[in-house]
Amino acid sequence: MIIVFKSDATEEQVQAVVGRITELGMSPHLSKGVARTLLGAIGDEKILTAHPVDAMPGVERVIPVLKPYKLASREFKKEDTTIDLGNGVIVGGQRFEIMAGPCAVESREQTLEIAEILHGFGVRILRGGAFKPRSSPYSFQGLGERGLKILAEARERTGMKVITEVMDADDAPMIAEHADILQIGARNMQNFSLLARLGKLQRPVMLKRGMSSTIQELLLAAEYILKEGNPHVMLCERGIKTFEPATRNTFDISAVPILKHESHLPVIADPSHATGIAYVIPPVALASMAAGADGIMVEVHNHPEKALCDGHQAVLPAPFAEMLVKLRVLAPSVGRTI
Ligand code: PEP
Ligand code: MN
């Protein structure tokens, strides 16, 4: 249920309704918009038939949410969610944000070198996995905490924000100390205990779509994080498994406008894991911007032939810079800055 308050409702009236919702065993989620305050009441909606809160002072109306996801829905929040990472880096605003970096943090030297190059290009968010979800247990698994410290050093040196993956809920608080955005990978999209743990932290989360998950399942997974009280969630389309073997996955471009329509959460596109082919990444990145994505995540490596993970799909710095030029040309025609 969404409880819409009158525009002149007082804070006491709002708090009285929050108290009543809690008393009835539902969980209250306040959203203070520019014009209106809304309260999402999550729980058994039938209770409200016997205990009508629309009779309480300050309440204008009560609207049932028909979608299975509530807090993630546009019904709950009309305005786009923006996630402020500090120093003017805001995901979900007018500026198209670029996250770039190697698939994995391989060494201090490699990470700092790539970070310096990307920083020089104006990239503001550095990606790099310290804990890697590899298909084979014999492949490089990441440097773990040492990798996080390298990322933190790159952040210190360049001022870039850092995004890195969390695979294990127990590692989440430690990773949150080193990273600005916690990534949940495709393989963990429905790891509900991990989602709930990140929901209890206040660090922004980027939730990647599972490779065989529907758009609705992605939004329901986001709901697990939001429900625990962390509103800073962004969604990521990273391709889905189809019968087409020409690309690593199939980039579901229509997921971008559908997610923007159904949800207020920022949407990031990952053309690297979606396509798995370096030359296909720049055109798909441009298409993502045109489709309404709020940003992209791209794997970049200066020595892809030596990369310990996903070297075949890494974009070299030069074509990456060319892609940025094209994105800058496209941006104003789709109402973006970059
Ligand atoms: C990644 O971004 O490092 C990654 C492993 O991607 P995905 O979870 O989308 O496969
Ligand atoms: Mn990768």
Image: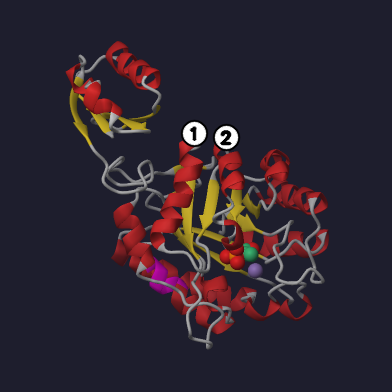
x 43%, y 50%: residue: 220
> Where does the magenta region start and end?
285-289
Q: What residue does disc 2 label? A: 200
Task: Please tell me whether residue 30 belongs to the stretch shown in magenta.
Answer: no
Q: What is the crowding at mark 2: few (fewer than 14 residues within 10 Å), some, or many (at least 20)?
A: some
Q: Is residue 300 left or right of residue 21?
A: right
Q: Is residue 328 left or right of residue 317?
A: left
The answer to which of 277 and 24 lies nearer the viewer is: 24
Quarter of the picture holding the C terminus: bottom left
Q: In the rendering, at what x and y percent does residue 208 appear?
A: 53, 59
* Residue 253 seen by the camera: yes
Label 2: which secondary element = helix
Amino acid type indicated by mark 1: Gly
Q: Is residue 265 left or right of residue 106?
A: left
The answer to which of 90 and 214 lies nearer the viewer is: 214
Q: What residue does disc 1 label? A: 229
Whether the residues at callouts 2 and 1 have beta carbons within 8 Å, the answer is: yes
Q: Is residue 153 above or below residue 286?
A: above
* Residue 7 seen by the camera: no
Q: In the rendering, at what x and y percent does residue 19 appear?
A: 37, 16
* Picture quadrant where residue 109 is located: bottom right
